Image (cartoon, rainbow, N blue to C red):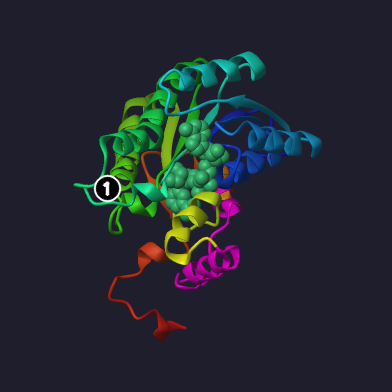
Amino acid sequence: MGIHDGKIVIVTGGALGIGGGASRAFAGEGARVIVADIDTDAGHQTVDEINAGGGEAAFVQADFSVPADPRRVVEHSVAVFGGVDFVFNNVGIQPRSSYANAEDTTEEMWDAILSINLKSYWLMAKYAIPVMRGRGGGVIINNASVQGQQSAPLVPAYAASKGGVLSLTRQLSLDYARQNIRVLAVCPGSIDTPLMRTAISGEAGEDPEDIDMAVLGAGANSPIGRIGQPEDIANVVVFLCSDKASFMTGEFVNVDGGVMAQGAWADLGRAR
Ligand SMILES: NC(=O)c1ccc[n+]([C@@H]2O[C@H](COP(=O)([O-])OP(=O)(O)OC[C@H]3O[C@@H](n4cnc5c(N)ncnc54)[C@H](O)[C@@H]3O)[C@@H](O)[C@H]2O)c1
């Protein structure tokens, strides 16, 4: 018995990283999972792993920079599993080549980041909500970031996309609360995923051992003293979709090892 027995969830970017963790966690709680991802090999691997372990999952290849694909993914979920109860809008990119100030950011890069990280979240909501309404309600969880609240140098498009995700979350929650559709966001801190390792390789170089050390270092600098794992986010997302969170909507949850609790002036060494 799982807390999501019989429910149907779509995870965008559901093959690897946080999305892969969420696909496995939902399946572990009895949900039927649509893994929607651009990476066919990784997507099939995640789905095969879930099905071999007694779960139920199906892969649909999708490119969330293409406006037609969210609708196709929702239609696929209806065709394969008969509906949609939850959407985890998780897909996101932060290419190394996007690190630039506003002057040096190209329009192509801005549009690529905003279309995947923000526009696809709205399009998934647009097409999933009518299906959810027909089933009596649903939950949408949007993956934002602590960078939707505070930022770091040289990430104008990524930071804007994540701020936009938090604003979209509040808006959808208001517009659909009376239709029993809850909308929430999670804000991960540093989570050990391919995206995080690519981002860190800019400073650490390409040597895998140097990247391992940089990942450990990023964790050591957080109040909790370790890097996050995809499961840390997935467990919270699974909870937020459950009836135990039925009075929550329009809110975001930091899952960051305490990073957002810390002032820039804080001397963390004193507390250790
Ligand atoms: N890792 C972190 O430290 C961190 C921190 C804060 C927020 N986030 C957010 O969490 C989300 C997931 O990040 P992650 O670290 O797991 O990323 P990741 O790059 O490790 O995994 C992303 C997944 O999305 C897929 N994908 C990429 N572009 C796609 C596209 N155009 N269409 C379909 N699928 C596509 C990839 O194939 C992969 O399976 C993102 O929204 C990211 O901004 C991550």
Image quadrant where one finds the N terminus: top right
Q: Image quadrant of residue 254?
A: bottom left
Which range is magenta? 207-234
The spot of residue 256 in percent (x, y) is 45, 59
Furthest residue to the front? 206
Furthest residue to the bottom? 270
- Where 106 sits versus 33, above or below? below
The number of discs equals: 1
Name the residue rendered at 58%, 56% in the picture: 229
Assess whether residue 229 is covered by the magenta stretch.
yes
The spot of residue 215 in percent (x, y) is 52, 65
Q: Is residue 261 left or right of residue 38?
A: left
The residue that label 1 is drawn on is 156
Q: Image quadrant of residue 81?
A: top right
Regarding residue 242, the answer to whether it shows in the image is no
Name the residue rendered at 28%, 76% in the picture: 265
- Where 165 sits versus 221, above or below? above
Q: Image quadrant of residue 152?
A: bottom left
> How many other residues sit within 10 Å of disc 1, few (<14), some (14-19) or many (≥20)?
some
Closer-to-camera residue (50/132): 50
